[in-house]
Amino acid sequence: MLRFITFFFLLFSISDYTSAQSSNFYTEAPHAIIMDVTTGEVLFEKDARVAMSPASMTKIMTAHMVFDALKDGVIEPDTKYLVSDEAWRRGGVSSGSSTMFLEAGSSVSVMDLLRGIIIQSGSDACITVAEGMAGSEEFFANRMTLKAKEMGLKTANFKNATGWPHPEHKISAYDLASLTKQSMLSYQDYFSIYSEGAFTWNGITQKNRNPLLGKFSGANGVKTGSTEDSGYGLVGSATIGENTRIIVVNGLASKSQRSSVSQKLMQAAFNQFKVYALYQKDDIVGQIDVYLGSKNTVSVMAESDINVGMYYGDRSSLKTKISYKDAVAPIIKGTHVADLIVSVPGRIDRIVPLLSAENINRDSLLGIAWSVLKNKIRGN
């Protein structure tokens, strides 16, 4: 028999469990997410798990591939790659793409190419890196997808290194946020390039397109993107005090709307959202019934820290319930015997394993017979 024990946190009242309603927080962005970097908790999401066209936000993955190769010693910061006619043609001014203004036939260092990718959003720099590291952009894109899957980015499917429109080139806002978090934590030195305000190449200075830099105190990244298919999008990051937050928006109608919506969302990320600590690892969460045991119940504990990020205005609607099937003795301490289901408005219910906090021995034969008889009388 499936059983539930329901707890309402923050209000500390008990009532029947109901499914989560919509969040009281609103943003204009068709796709949006706020993620806390320290805990990895999602604070807010809106159609964030749906695969979408990322446009130039793709280049966060392209740069991450370079960061990886630098860390592994496959390439060095001063390694140079040849700019092919293909990179110059498809990534140059005539292509309609953002460009670093590379010259065909020239050789450019990895660090300069990274700044061209990150600050100038140069498609020519992306193609040059892809060809230099993998022989072709197609092979490099395949490697991007494989690496993304290794990182747990389930929706990622890359067909190029630039974000050029392709019907199968997709990734969700959630996976973009997760990619950014992992890149930020793994490659802090290289990631700092995202906060640089401008870069000059071939005598041409281009400013960083990120609308948060210089306008939001603490902003330190990340990348914009826009195509007719994707609309206007941004992956942004900022640090205030000990908190670092990542936002992703996409599908906006204009550059000005992207700027205003991004600034509002980042401001809200720090002022209107919080990570609540529900339980620490090994905290007792509750008790569940035990069948045929020397005790009728067993305490259950958190397998790991349980944190929940959410909008201040939704905190009274935070709900949890313990879900379990009849636990049959003997039970060994540390066994997975139940789940905690956490319900937050506007979000998919989260299921967290709960473990037995003690050993429960099998009851005596007489006790077992009595338990069986009682259950028969009750019709169980």
Image (cartoon, rainbow, N blue to C red):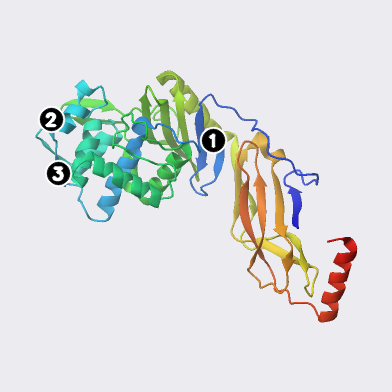
> Relative to residue 73, is residue 136 depicted above or below?
above
Instruction: Name, please, the residue furthest toward the bottom.
Output: 365
Q: Residue at x 77, y 47 (%)?
A: 12
Q: Position of residue 70 (x, y in %)?
A: 25, 51
- Alpha-carbon span between mark 2 and mark 3: 14 Å
50 or 254, nearer to the observer: 50
What residue does disc 3 label? 80
**Disc assigned to residue 103:** 2
- Alpha-carbon span between mark 2 and mark 1: 42 Å
Q: Residue at x 87, y 65 (%)?
A: 376
User: Does label 2 or label 3 sit earlier along the sequence?
Assistant: 3
Q: Residue at x 22, y 36 (%)?
A: 127
Question: Crowdedness of circle 3 by 10 Å Cα count: few (<14), some, many (20+)?
Answer: some
User: Does label 3 or label 1 sit earlier along the sequence?
Assistant: 3
Q: Position of residue 99 (x, y in %)?
A: 23, 27
Q: From the viewer's perspective, is the residue at label 2 or at label 1 nearer? A: 2
Instruction: Name, please, the residue furthest toward the right.
Output: 377
**Disc assigned to residue 269:** 1
**Disc 2 secondary structure class:** loop
Instruction: Name, please, the residue furthest toward the left.
Output: 105
User: Does label 2 or label 1 sit earlier along the sequence?
Assistant: 2
